[in-house]
Structures are given as C-alpha cells and as structure tokens.
Image: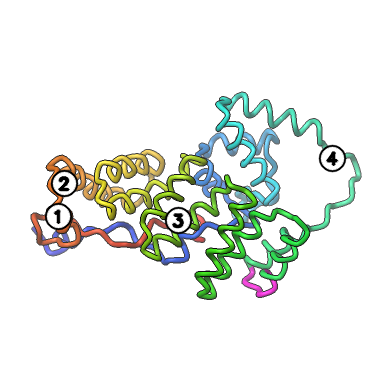
Amino acid sequence: MSKKDNKVLRFPSAPLKADYQRVQSTYTVTEIKQLFGLSERLIRRWTEQGVVQAATSSESGEPLYDFQALTQFRRVRELRSRGLTLKQVEAEIQGQMNLFKPTAGQVARLLTPFEEALILHERGEQKAAECYKEAIREGDNVADAYCNLGIIELEQGNMAKALDCFSLSLKNEPRHVEAHYDLANLYFDAGDLKLARLHYESAAELEPSFSPLHYNLALVYYHLDDLNRACGSLHRYKELAPEDEDMRAINELLKWLEQARDLGKPDNLGNLGNSDAAGSPGVSSIRKKNSSGQ
C-alpha cells in the first residue's frame, strides 16, 4: 500500500466560521436546495412560474433569492411539516400570491432596518450590528436579527454574548432553524456534547433535509459513543448530499464505524483517532462546511 493510500482518514475539514449559519441577504439555488431539501429542478421551475420570486441574477445569470424569497421558502417548510405534498404546497403559495399581488405603478418598497443590516453585514461593515439592534427595537424580524447579531459577536470572540443572542432568537421564535444550528455548534465548540446534540436534533426535526445537520450529528454521536446513531446520521447525510466531493472518504469512514458498531466493543472507540490501531481511520473534530460558506 502506498504512503498516500495509508494516510489518516478524517472528516472533511472547514474553517470554523463556515459552520455557523446566518440569515443572508441573498441565496443561490444551491443554498436554497441545501437549506430546505428541495430539488434544484423544482426551485428553478417555481422561479420560472413565479411561485417564488428571484430578486436578481448573478453575473453568470443564475437566480438569486432575497430575504423576502427566504420567507416564502420558510412557508414551504412550514406547510410541508403539516403533511402537505409539494403539489399542495405549490397551490397554497400561488393562492397567497394572488391575494397580495402588487398594484401597477406601486412605489418601490424601502428597506427595513433588518434588510439594511443584512446588506451591511455581507459588506463587512460594523454598522450592521447597530442596524440589527434597531431592527430588534422595532420588532423587525427579531429572531433573525438576534441570530445574525450572535454571528457578529462570535466573529469578535464574544462567545457568551453570542450564546445570549442565539438564546434570545429562540425565545422569540422557538422553531428558528439557524439559531438551533448555531447554538449546537457553539455548545460543540465549548465541549458540551449533550446540549450540542439537543440543538442539532431540534434543528433536524424542524428541517430534516438540511444536510450539514446530519453530518454534525454523526460527529456528536461518535463522541458520545453512540455508533449506531452515528452511522444512521452519516447514511442520512449521504442521501442528502450525494455530490459531496469527499464521498469516498466518507464511505470509508462509515464502513469502519459500522464494523466497530457491529463488534460492540467499547474498547475500540479509543482507537478511532489512531490510524495504526487495527487499520482504523482517524476522525477530526472539525464539522462539515455548508455550501454558503458562512
């Protein structure tokens, strides 16, 4: 076996910030697909038919979706959680659009403090934090504003303040997927695996098609010595992200995890980080990057 083939196998790595999920000012088709578990074909068809509105296009002509479109996709998530089929969801969304069609010659809508904050945040401007706070004071998308304010606090190294922000986001909207996901990441980084598991599982219950959740859950389950659930979560991740460029490594890791699980020998768990122990692959503690790069 060559030296290259004998290297330690690790979870695909990503910069730490890439693991946190904030509400963005614009989303690509790929990001919407990953976040909501919808097929690219369906997203494009809905865009062409006007079921959802693309705010603009990228330089390559690809549609981009703003916060208003994100709100529509969240409505799709809510309707699906009630048991509606995609066909029923489409009919429901179209019916709502007919009720609120803009009148001819309508004056362009001004940005709200939250929407202004989103743009400033993506530009990296410090004023974004103040705009998020203004949005909170005015009751403008409070949960989203707290979530993104938490990201800013993290970027400044204020983990305690970030924790407060994510918690306040959930206080205002208990079903806020991004806040649950970010809290899970925060607890994981702090070494509190049980709370990390709680919030990953909560986010996965709210949005079961968000693929990075299942990758991260597999990692948490592994550290909690629950190889059965680790294998199940990794299988789910594979189903949701078959295009992952690291799939060969993931398959190798999954094969070893299943072998260790089937053996049912706790002593083997200590060898997960040692590539020389019974040929077992090592596992890094870095989580899976989401496609938005946030």
Q: Nearer the viewer, mark 3 or mark 4?
A: 3
In the rendered structure, the answer to whether residue 171 lies left or right of residue 201 reads right
Q: Is residue 125 magenta?
A: yes
Q: Residue at x 69, y 51 (%)?
A: 56
- In primary-sequence order, the first of circles 4 and 2 is 4
As rendered, which of 180 and 247 lies closer to the eye? Answer: 180
Gap between marks 3 and 4 measured at Cα: 40 Å
Q: Position of residue 134 (x, y in %)?
A: 75, 65
Looking at the rendered structure, the kind of residue marked 1 is Ser
Q: Nearer the viewer, mark 1 or mark 3?
A: 3
Gap between marks 4 and 2 measured at Cα: 59 Å
In the rendered structure, the answer to whether residue 6 lies left or right of residue 193 reads left
Q: Which residue is mark 4?
A: 102
Evaluate if marks 4 and 1 touch, with contact meaning CB atoms under 8 Å apart.
no
Looking at the rendered structure, the kind of residue marked 3 is Ala
Q: Which mark is residue 280?
A: 1
